[in-house]
Image (tube, rainbow, N blue to C red):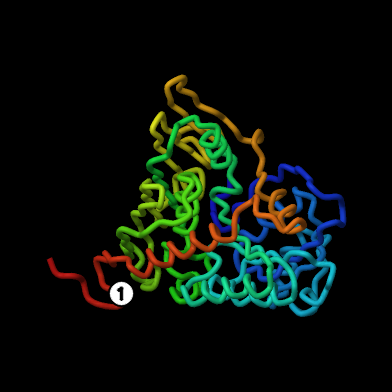
Amino acid sequence: MSADGGTYAPAPLPDPVVSDGEFPIAAVGLDHGHVFGMCEGLLGAGATLSWVWDPDPAKVERFRERFPQARAARSEAEVLDDPAVRLVAGAAVTSERCALGLRVMDAGKDYFTDKAPLTTLEQLAAAREGVRRTGRKYAVYYSERVHVEAAVFAGQLIEQGAIGKVVQVIGMGPHRLNAANRPAWFFEKEKYGGILVDIGSHNVDQVLHYTGSTSARVVNSQIANYANPEHPELDDFGDANLVTDTGATGYFRCDWFTPDGLQSWGDGRTFILGTEGYIEQRKYFNLGTQDGPGHVFLANGEQETHFRVSGKVGYPFFGQLVRDCLERTETAMTQEHAFTAIELAVQAQEAAVDLSPVPRGGAAREG
């Protein structure tokens, strides 16, 4: 298990839905390590990785060490001008992801971006317009659900009616900071968007998905910089409450306080309450054990069960996304869901009360 969430990329569980060469893809924008997991997932679904481009040759070289089949492009244009490429996967600086997506879609290709897919409501409006204008996809890697077997399995249990109607989702999104290994942009709010955008978009995606909701409203939200005054623009804590259009509630907490003694980069957990039972996910490990990832606990009127799902469920999102791109369907994730999740995350960030004990760049708060 990686000690750094920025390099988290689950081991491939291949389940090809296309033949070799049928679905060529490219990677453009290597600023976040999630691009490795994105490409692993697509390759497991049968995609063919044709190109890689980033302005930094060192990033390209590291990428090609993992994926030597990818040709190093001389420019972004060389990738976008290749008519064979069907989809471009990218993990650029967060505030630059929308602009990249617009260029990709204008080139007639589908776009698959790391979360958060953008940072402002203005960018969201541009992305929506780009999708409308081009007819292309702006898909989002909400990895804490689509690339985690416990999360996939929990969704399958809910679809089977195991806990009745979902009435609340609680998500915990702790991450290890590893500040010394982070790029400068990671600490600039204009570029990373704030913690409720960066990490919180994962959690909003899960609230919407598990409750079967198409919209929600932000009831309240909070952010803080509790322990990193040397990085005044960093939010090291954030939380929010949502109410969905199904009447369910959602609460999530994000933070950068994973202790060094923990075996993983974050003890990600999700609690799902239904009218007939509940589910807990312990996604990355089971605290105090060496049992590995993939723990799902279910209690309902028939059973109390601990499921160990690692290596058993797979990641159907990627195969569904590939087929969606070929068939112009929406089985992996609807475009509206992908956009609504980030819209709510941005709204939560913009409305958040700042609880920092020392105002950003100022003196300590009184009393």
View extreme (top): residue: 302
The spot of residue 361 in percent (x, y) is: 30, 78
Observer-nearest residue: 341 or 366?
Answer: 341
Q: Quadrant of the C terminus?
A: bottom left
Query: Left or right: 98 with respect to 50?
Result: left
Which quadrant would residue 4 be assigned to in this image? Answer: bottom right
Q: Nearer the viewer, residue 314 or 178?
A: 314
Query: Where 143 sits versus 192, above or below?
Result: above
Picture quarter with the N terminus: top right
Could one spot residue 259 in this view of the protein?
no
Which residue corresponds to the image point at 78% horizontal and 64% vertical from the top-left? 86
Residue displayed at 48% across by 77% down: 122
Q: Which residue is mark 1?
A: 360
Res. 50 visible in picture: yes
In the image, taking residue 117 as reference, residue 62 lies left or right, namely: right
Where residue 353 sits, quadrant-wise, is bottom left
Of residue 301 and residue 81, the one placed in the foreground of this image is 301
- Say which residue appears at 44% left-offset and 58% top-offset: 200
Q: Give the percent coordinates (x, y) of residue 63.
A: 73, 63
What is the secondary structure assignment of the residue under circle 1?
Answer: loop
Position in image of residue 85 (x %, y %): 80, 67
What residue type is disc 1 on? Arg
